Image (spheres, rainbow, N blue to C red):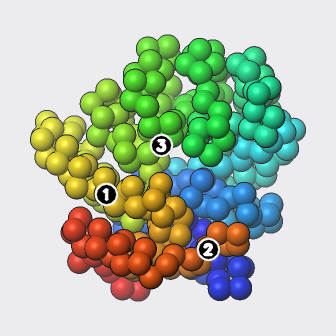
Amino acid sequence: MVTPFTKEGEVDYAAHKRNVERWNKEELGGYLVLGSNSETPYLNETEKIRLIELTAQYAARGRKIFAGTGLESTRESIRLTTKAAEAGAHAALVLTPCFYGSQMTDDALIAHFRHIADASRIPILIYNMPAFTHINVSVAAVGALSRHPNVIGMKDSAGDVRQLEAIMKVVPETFNLIVGTAAAWYPALTLGISAGILALANVAGNQCAMVQTYHEGGQAEKARELHEKLLPVNAAVTSTFGIAGLKYAATLLGYDAGCVRSPLVPLSESARKQIEELLSAAGLLGLKVSH
């Protein structure tokens, strides 16, 4: 979920509430608060907890609330996970520590996640985001962690379909392997993965869900065609223009996405036009719903 900020850089909690109520109308299974696209590194603890509380309060009945609680130290990750549980999170998504990257061996990561899982009153999921952390959790480490009763899954944002396939071979069937990028959404579905936590779902939740509906309904060609139609938009709001691009796209589609928080900067006029063109080409702009 994007985090809306005012022009002055304050969290706009009223806008966040409105966005949750709008997402409630989309075909989504739940919400990830404090993910990579939430500008989480720029939020303090008070802001984080309030965003979790509001999401839990206004989410549609039956939707799962995940909260990103991974910090650099095991101790602080446990502390934030405990607070997230108290605020209403159903599960914690724990990002890999990365500052001392060369020291984050399999043994170090396995011990880190096990300690958090042992201490947490809610289930945890591994969050593998090598584009930002420059740490790629190994297949062997995932296999070992998947045996812990409180490590229930993993969001893998590496975008490597072969790695997803390899992980599936070493984890129990009950392990929730979740694809973390829309770029790999359709290929992941063909492997048997049945869930995605996608930046693109901020602006195209129904369309992302329809790819899955088509696939599970035996309409593979329709699923592939829709996925390919969405790929240019996904690239624009992730790797090309980043969070500022995602927020601008969300704003065009009627959300209260707000501004980015410094040191991120707003989009240029040319970038805005490119996003507008991509949304139009994907057939998304005509779906705007006013508040």
- Provide the residue designation for mark 1: 232
Q: Earlier in the sequence, mark 3 or mark 2?
A: 3
Q: Give the crowd class for mark 1: few <14, some 14-19, many >=20 residues within 10 Å.
A: some
Question: x and y percent of residue 44 in the render?
Answer: 79, 63
The quarter holding residue 3 reads bottom right
- Whether residue 247 sits left or right of residue 229 in the image: it is right
Q: Secondary structure at mark 2?
A: loop
Q: Nearer the viewer, mark 3 or mark 2?
A: 2
The quarter holding residue 118 reads top right
Separation (CA) of disc 3 from disc 2:
24 Å
- Provide the residue designation for mark 2: 265
Q: Nearer the viewer, mark 1 or mark 3?
A: 1
Q: Earlier in the sequence, mark 2 or mark 1?
A: 1
Q: Is residue 223 above or below residue 201?
A: above
Q: Earlier in the sequence, mark 1 or mark 3?
A: 3
Label at residue 180: 3
**Residue at left offset 24%, top offset 73%:** 280
**Residue at left offset 50%, top offset 36%:** 158
Question: x and y percent of residue 229 in the render?
Answer: 22, 55
The image quadrant where one finds the N terminus is: bottom right
